[in-house]
Amino acid sequence: MKNITKIIKDINSKVKTYINTTVEKIDDMLPRWVYWHFYKHVYYHIKMSLWGLFKFMKISTKMVPWDYSSILMMLEFQLTILKHSLATGHEDKESLDIKLAHMERAIFLLKHIIEDDYVSLVMPDYHELNNVKIVKTDAINGKECYTVGFVGSETLHKKLKDASVTANKLYIQEWNEFWNILRGDMDNNIWGLNVWWD
């Protein structure tokens, strides 16, 4: 994988050098407006296309068409890139710190939502304690029926059920908080996603 990355960087560097040299030659021959037109519509798009192709390859290979978590994974990936870009940008520190704090919190919440294991957050040993087995029940219309039965004491069963209810409440709370962060509140100077740019 390191060799592939090195090869890609070498190709990118050679393409960039070639394009820069070509742009300099064109700049000497053509008026300034033609140069900027070329830069904007050719060089810049080629450069960003190559960057995007290699940067997003590792996340795009995880995308699936049947689950909304793919959208959230892409959002988390892009927010992480954007956060780094803003942190190294030119914005005033006071407003930047607020944006970065909101972005960090949004990324943190996204990780929880994508992992979708809130019961482990509420009760770390939930999966070890939640023992179930298949048990036979009364026959219906002469056919044997089975159900999933809990193995353990009633106290433990209640404890696990309470943890599950609490986990569901936590999920709803974090889901709503995440979208509130993205939405922002312009009336109270809380910056949402629409102003997260440098």
Image (cartoon, helix red, strand yellow):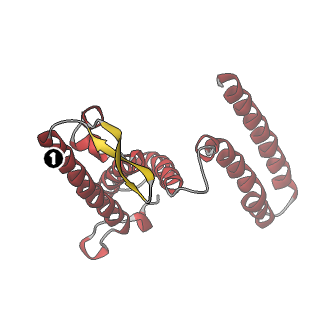
Asked where in the image residue 155 lies, by quadrant, the reply is top left
Residue 86 visible in the shown view: no
Asked where in the image residue 188 lies, by quadrant, the reply is bottom left
- Residue that protrudes farthest toward the bottom in the picture: 187
Q: Tell me: 178 left or right of 197.
A: left
- Residue that protrudes farthest toward the left in the picture: 155
Question: Looking at the image, which is closer to me, 62 or 5?
Answer: 62
**Residue underneath mark 1:** 158
- Residue that protrudes farthest toward the right in the picture: 29
Mark 1, residues whose alpha carbon is within 10 Å: few (<14), some, or many (≥20)? few
As drawn, 73 above or below 194: above
Q: Quadrant of the N terminus?
A: top right
How many dots with numbers? 1
Q: Tell me: 101 left or right of 22.
A: left
Question: Looking at the image, which is closer to me, 125 or 88?
Answer: 125
State the image coordinates of residue 61 (x, y, percent, origin top left).
Answer: 63, 43
- The residue depicted at 21 percent of the width and 39 percent of the height is 123
- Residue that protrudes farthest toward the top in the picture: 3
- The residue depicted at 65 percent of the width and 23 percent of the height is 2
State the image coordinates of residue 86 (x, y, percent, origin top left).
Answer: 44, 51
Q: Tell me: 62 left or right of 93.
A: right
State the image coordinates of residue 103 (x, y, percent, origin top left).
Answer: 36, 53
Element carrying mark 1: helix
Q: Tell me: 130 left or right of 115.
A: left
Question: Looking at the image, which is closer to me, 144 or 146?
Answer: 144
Amino acid at pointer 1: Lys
- The residue depicted at 70 percent of the width and 22 percent of the height is 3
Asked where in the image residue 148 lies, by quadrant, the reply is top left
Residue 111 visible in the shown view: yes
State the image coordinates of residue 184 (x, y, percent, origin top left).
Answer: 33, 68
